[in-house]
Image (cartoon, helix red, strand yellow):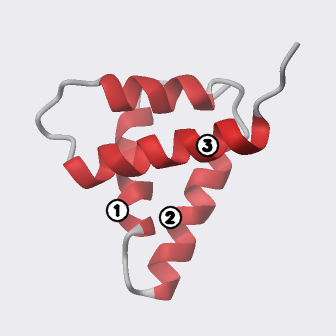
Amino acid sequence: MISNQNIPARLTEAFIHCGSPVTEERKAGETQLGNLATDRGYPLYLLEYIANQDPNILPQCRLRAAIEFKRWVNSDWVAV
C-alpha cells in the first residue's frame, strides 16, 4: 500500500500533467495515475481527494478526480 502522506500532492501533480497539451507531460501524468491505481486504496484516495475542502485543490483537479473515479467504477467495480 502506498503511504497516504503525499497522496493529495501526487494526485494533483498527475491531474495537472494529464490536462497538459504537451504529449510527454500528459503521458507522464497518465503513468503516475496508473501507478497510483495499482494500490487497493486508489478509489478511496480519489473520494477523499474529491471531498477534501482544501482551497488549494484546483477545481479542474477535483473534476478530474471525479471523472477518474467514475472511470474506475465503470472498469474495475466488482459486485460480490
Task: Tell which circle, 3 or 2, labels the residue nearer the N-terminal end.
Answer: 2
| x and y, in percent, of residue 40 in the image | 71, 26
| x and y, in percent, of residue 38 in the image | 73, 40
As drawn, 78 above or below 65? above
Q: In which quadrant will I find the N terminus?
A: top right
As drawn, 11 above or below 48? below
Q: Marks 1 and 2, Cα distance to the nearest angstrom?
A: 7 Å
Of residues 55 and 72, the one nearer the viewer is 72
Residue tagged 2: 29
Asked if the residue at tag 2 contacts the one at tag 1, i.e. Cβ–Cβ closer than 8 Å, the answer is: yes
Q: Residue 16 carries which label?
A: 1
Q: What element carries label 3?
A: helix
The amino acid type found where label 3 is placed reads Leu
Residue tagged 3: 36
Q: Counting other residues with Cα less than 10 Å from the Cα at mark 1, is it few (<14), some (14-19), or many (20 or more)?
A: some
| x and y, in percent, of residue 49 in the image | 37, 31
The amino acid type found where label 1 is placed reads Ile
